[in-house]
Amino acid sequence: MGGSKSDPERLDEFAMIARHFAPLSKGETGALGLLDDGAVLDVPTDQQLIVTTDTLVDGVHFLPDTSAADIATKSLAANVSDLASMGAGAKWIFLNLQLPEKINDDWLAEFAESLKAGLAQCSCVLAGGDTVRTPGPLAISITAMGMVDQGRALKRSGAKPGDDIWVSGTLGDAKLGLDLLQGNIGLGEAEHAEFLKRRHLRPVARTGLGQSLGHNALANACIDISDGLVADLGHICVASGVSAVLQMEDVPLSPAARTLGRAGELAALGGGDDYELLFAADAQARATIEALGQSLGLAISRIGEITDEATHSVKVRNSSGAEIAVPDGGWRHF
Amino acid sequence: MGGSKSDPERLDEFAMIARHFAPLSKGETGALGLLDDGAVLDVPTDQQLIVTTDTLVDGVHFLPDTSAADIATKSLAANVSDLASMGAGAKWIFLNLQLPEKINDDWLAEFAESLKAGLAQCSCVLAGGDTVRTPGPLAISITAMGMVDQGRALKRSGAKPGDDIWVSGTLGDAKLGLDLLQGNIGLGEAEHAEFLKRRHLRPVARTGLGQSLGHNALANACIDISDGLVADLGHICVASGVSAVLQMEDVPLSPAARTLGRAGELAALGGGDDYELLFAADAQARATIEALGQSLGLAISRIGEITDEATHSVKVRNSSGAEIAVPDGGWRHF
């Protein structure tokens, strides 16, 4: 965790690392207490390293009044979810923080505490990073690393015509939670509103599912839903050279999203940041996948089929077989 | 290279990755063409992975009018130098770009072209990343990864009383180049001025030296000079539980820096961003280290000695043995 050369309070920065971040490296001697130029890590033989990285910017990827704890949770989940979508659990993260002047020690303490809890949940440690001052907005880049058995990484490519399309959890909740936080929609039941906001603020990566799908070679293609169901399924289609048809009535909506009717359905198709896993699998794997969902205590829904149509596009049908117009796939945060 | 969910021109972003960055992943199939959620990498058996990361912010770590090509060179060199200081060459980098609105395709083309040239020089590839829009300044985070033989990573700890202190190249040039660019100093000879500016704008990591020191277990402790000679030697002293004495007349200055007299000496002691390697080694290794410098065509100077003084401090002596007052070690960029 190289101390920044640009921090106006250089000594404070070393103290900051020692106080807030060094404890998060506990258990990994190769992190060298975040005191050296880098980390020295051992990758087990017969495993491949999966590496992913994501940047979140204040006012772009989260609302300006988001708490430090929620920012930490979301930054970590976005990266851990990318690892899950490739079949890996998280083992190490590297944290790049760009801190504006307004960030104080209390903020850092809350951020680090939340990150620590998130890391503990996925048996992962902070192995390095960099902190710098910025005249711009707060920004967090995390680079996350994990392992898969040799040759068992899940990819976006590999979906075949005839494959079932599956998705975990419920969709659209995070988008509706954002709409609620922004005051764009209202919701009568406080319990539903809290659920949706929480889905936006504190996403959970589906690591157990991703690891099982990869380890058991159950999925032919996989992606996590960060851009939205239709957009992310589109990525699988393009990467795999296939198309897809979804059945709207099979797309899983939470009870909270259902109360919003058509808005709930649109959020499920186009809203991002749910961090559920979307994957294509052989039809023969149906019983195994359903059993896997039960063993994980996680709903896994079969929502459509991969086709050989040459357009590499995603169609959505209603219960009478008519095609539903899909809102533009290009999901934006705000 | 996950496409950002927040780019106002989302399709343009996929085109940007395909046009400018995907070519930089050539040669590493595990980068998956920068099209997937992450990279799938193979770490050879018997090797350890070294990972380091650095963030550079416009106006903080480089002057606002720095060219795209120079920004790419410096971002890469800062990270590759950290790997070199641990004994590793660079194998993969991950690039997080925060782009303000003003960044256009020409800028990206120049940045990518320069990065490509830098990567080619160190036989390294771009294996992933993330690009997002920001309302703030341009910022570049690079996470660089390389390998060392098992147990051969160089660290800041390990220096012992009686060790020689060595440094590569010449010191203070980058600071003087920055002073020139900012108009804080003037220099008669154009050739000297160009040399110093170039040392600031286009640093070169000492990868060959770092790899040899690590592979042959020649250095007991090593660091790259990014904060300044005295400050970085201080990091070694603290990490190793030792102190150090430097001889000012042995600190290597370039002919250009020498023309500046006392200002040149102060820059050599306190100026940062030279990215030379500073290391401690057994006195018995002198002949081997001198031969290594000759074989690399790189000046390596013996500049002092590690002592057992309990203060964990750095002293600088002049040729008559008197102690020189050292400017505060806390080097700031501007």
Image (spheres, coloured by chain):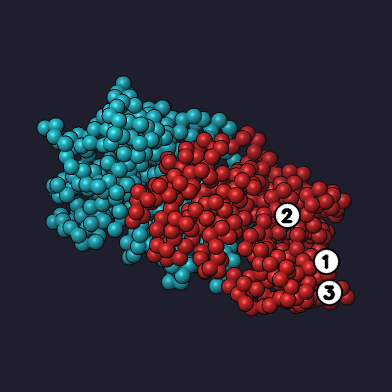
Chain colours: A cyan, B red
Q: Where is residue A132 drawn, in percent x and y?
A: 52, 64
Relative horizontal placement of residue B1, taking residue B191 as reference (left or right): left
Whether residue B186 is visible? yes
Q: Are marks 2 and 3 in contact (CB under 8 Å)?
A: no
Relative horizontal placement of residue A153, taking residue B248 as reference (left or right): left
Q: What residue does disc 3 label?
A: B318
User: Secondary structure beneath disc 2?
Assistant: strand
Q: What residue does disc 1 label?
A: B250
Q: Where is residue A192 drawn, in percent x and y?
A: 19, 52
Residue drawn 32% across the image and 41% down it? A232
Residue drawn 67% across the image and 78% down it? B185
Q: Chain of mark 1?
A: B
Measured in 3D between alpha carbons, the distance from the residue under mark 2 to the one under mark 1, in whole angstroms, is 20 Å
Relative horizontal placement of residue A109, taking residue B309 as reference (left or right): left
Q: Amino acid at mark 1?
A: Asp
Name which of mark 1 and mark 3 comes first in the sequence: 1
Measured in 3D between alpha carbons, the distance from the residue under mark 1 to the one under mark 3, in whole angstroms, is 9 Å
Q: Chain of mark 3?
A: B
Q: Quadrant of residue A281?
A: top left
Q: What residue does disc 2 label?
A: B221
Name which of mark 2 and mark 1 comes first in the sequence: 2
Name which of mark 2 and mark 3 comes first in the sequence: 2
Q: Amino acid at mark 3?
A: Asn
